[in-house]
Every structure is written in C-alpha cells, then in structure tokens.
Amino acid sequence: MLERKNQAKLLTTVGIIAAFSVLAFIGTTVIRVPIPATGGYFNLGDTFVMTAALLYGPTVGAFVGLIGPTASDALGFPQFILATAVIKFFEGLLIGLIARNTINVGRIWFALIIGIIILVGGYFIFEAYIYPTLAKTIPFFGVTDLKAAIAELLPNLLQGIFSAILAFSLWKLFKRKSNS
C-alpha cells in the first residue's frame, strides 16, 4: 500500500512539474519584449517558476525553472540556455526553500525578493563575466559583455518584480481556494 501511495505522489509531482513547466515555457516564449543590447528579452516565465515554488516547494520550483524557460531558450536563444538553466533552477529552489510550509506573507515576499535577486544578479554575472570568459575559447558564448549586462539590469529587475507580483497574486488565489 505504501509503495502505491509513493508512486501516486511521484506521479502527481511529475504532473505538476510538467504542467508548470509548460506554463513557464509559454510565459517565456509567447510574451517576449526584446532587449537589443544583449539579444535577450523580457518575459513572464518567471511568474510560473515563482508560483510553482511557492505552491509546491523547492523541488518543483527548481525543476520548473530548469525545464520551462530553458526549453524556451532552445527556440532561438540557445546562447542563453546555460545561464537560464542555472539561474532559474536556483530561483525556483531558493524561493521554494524559503517559502516552504508558510502562509506568512512577509516570508513569501522575502522568498520572492530573493528570487528577483537571483534573477537579476545571475544574469548580470553570466553576461558580464562568465560568458565573456567562456567566449575566449568558445565563440558561441560571445554574445554579451559588461556594458550589455548593465543595460539588462533594469529590464531584468522589472521582469522579476512584475513576475513576483503575479506569482504572489496566484499564490494567494490558490491558497484561498485550497482553504475553502
């Protein structure tokens, strides 16, 4: 009986990861506002990474971050796959860890702010330092530099803030529905 229960839980978790990964993929792919300085783009995919982490915890948040937005980058922005995979994985993981098992609004917002910092700081580090270093031996990564990374700070910050507000709203909605 226990094994069936574990299988059902695993299947449910995989289904939740798949559903939120699709939402994150769509949120990243459908609404794209280009950022000319780097070839990157503003999108709403983080909304679903953050929401998944808030509702279902660090494992689901991490895998949604790893799968959905990264798959979207594979369609036309493959140079950002490495950065997106690392950043969005940790965004979902840390939001989920901080917000785990709480309904405390202050802690939820703290988790979301940490997610925004990971998003903005992570892309800045990749674009200003990691990619230029990798480009010295792998030209494929020669897509950005310090100047471009600075130009992306504000759009990435706005993306993070907007996504956090939407994620918080969805969290509240689903928490209210589950308590009814």
Image (cartoon, rainbow, N blue to C red):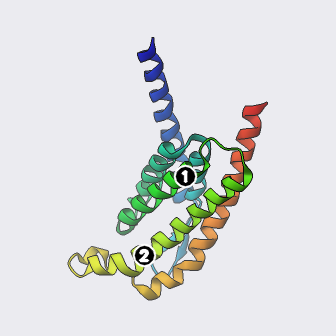
Crowd tier of the residue under label 2, counting other residues whose Cα lies within 10 Å: few below 14, some 14–19, many 20 or above = some
What's the mark number on residue 70?
A: none
Judge left or right: residue 50 versus residue 121. right
Q: Say what amino acid the circle numbered 2 marks.
A: Ile
Depth order, front residue of 55/76: 55
Judge left or right: residue 50 versus residue 37. right
Specify whether residue 64 is in view: yes
Residue at x 40%, y 60% (from the top left corner): 86
Q: Which residue is mark 2?
A: 125
Q: Is residue 173 above or below residue 81?
A: above
Q: Earlier in the sequence, mark 2 or mark 1?
A: 1
Q: Say what amino acid the circle numbered 1 marks.
A: Val
Query: Residue 173 location, x and y as percent?
Result: 74, 43
Q: CA distance from mark 2 to mark 1?
A: 20 Å
Tag 1's secondary structure? Answer: helix
Specify whether residue 39 is in view: no
Residue at x 61%, y 47% (from the top left corner): 54
What number of labels is visible?
2
Q: Which residue is mark 1?
A: 49
